[in-house]
Image (cartoon, helix red, strand yellow):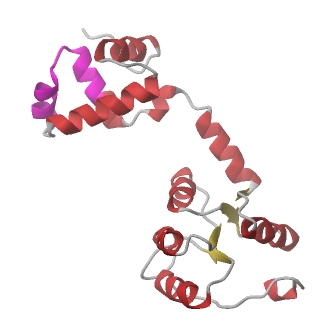
Amino acid sequence: MLEMAEDLHVVGEAASGGEALTLTVTLRPDVVLMDLRMPDVDGTEATARITARLPGVRVLVLTTYDTDEDILRAIEAGAVGYLLKDTPLAQLVDAIHAAARGESVLAPLVAARLADRRRAPIAEQLTPREAEVLGLVAHGLSNPEIGRVLFISEATVKTHLVRAFVKLGVSDRTAAVTAALSRGILRPPL
């Protein structure tokens, strides 16, 4: 299908993530179209390896999977774009050109999902563990006590708290609990 586009040249085709990595290292294409579900090495891991090893190669995900987790993992792995396989050929060709220029390319549905995620209430952005740690802080437990209750190190407790502080826009335990209570993330302790 892509060979029909006059200004695109398909230099290789891979049946697995490992093969995609090998061919990319050998052929050095400008753009790699990457599926997510493949044998041996999945597309996200192959994307991460390609972008780490060959930063000039742009990876454009082309898949049927459109879950938030799949989208975020692919972008975090270094993909410059994320398209769905039902993308019309003309738009796919334009996206490949844009990816080659280093521009971000997102299917409209993908862009909308990412935008919705950014507008999500803060409670949805805290991980369950961060909320759990904050709940124990609200009950008056110290970091070492929280670590013992949750079977995690004190350093891990501190990491969860720091991340929660950032997400809540606060700088200490008391402010974090107050913000979490006022926003409905935590219920008042009984």
Which residue is pictured at 48% across the width and 68% down the height?
Answer: 48
Q: Is residue 17 magenta?
A: no
Q: In this view, does 147 lie to the left or right of 186?
A: left
The image shows residue 177 at horizontal and vertical percentages of: 34, 15
Q: What stretch is highlighted in magenta?
A: 132-150
Q: In this view, does 92 lie to the left or right of 79?
A: right
Q: Quadrant of residue 75?
A: bottom right
Q: In which quarter of the image is the N terminus?
A: bottom right
Main SS, magenta region, reads: helix
Q: Quadrant of residue 24?
A: bottom right
Which residue is pictured at 61% across the width and 74% down the height?
Answer: 34
Tell me if I can see residue 63 in this picture: no
Which residue is pictured at 24% across the width and 32% down the height?
Answer: 158
Establish if 106 lies above or below 30: above
The image shows residue 135 at horizontal and vertical percentages of: 28, 22
Which residue is pictured at 45% across the width and 29% down the height?
Answer: 167
Q: Is residue 141 magenta?
A: yes
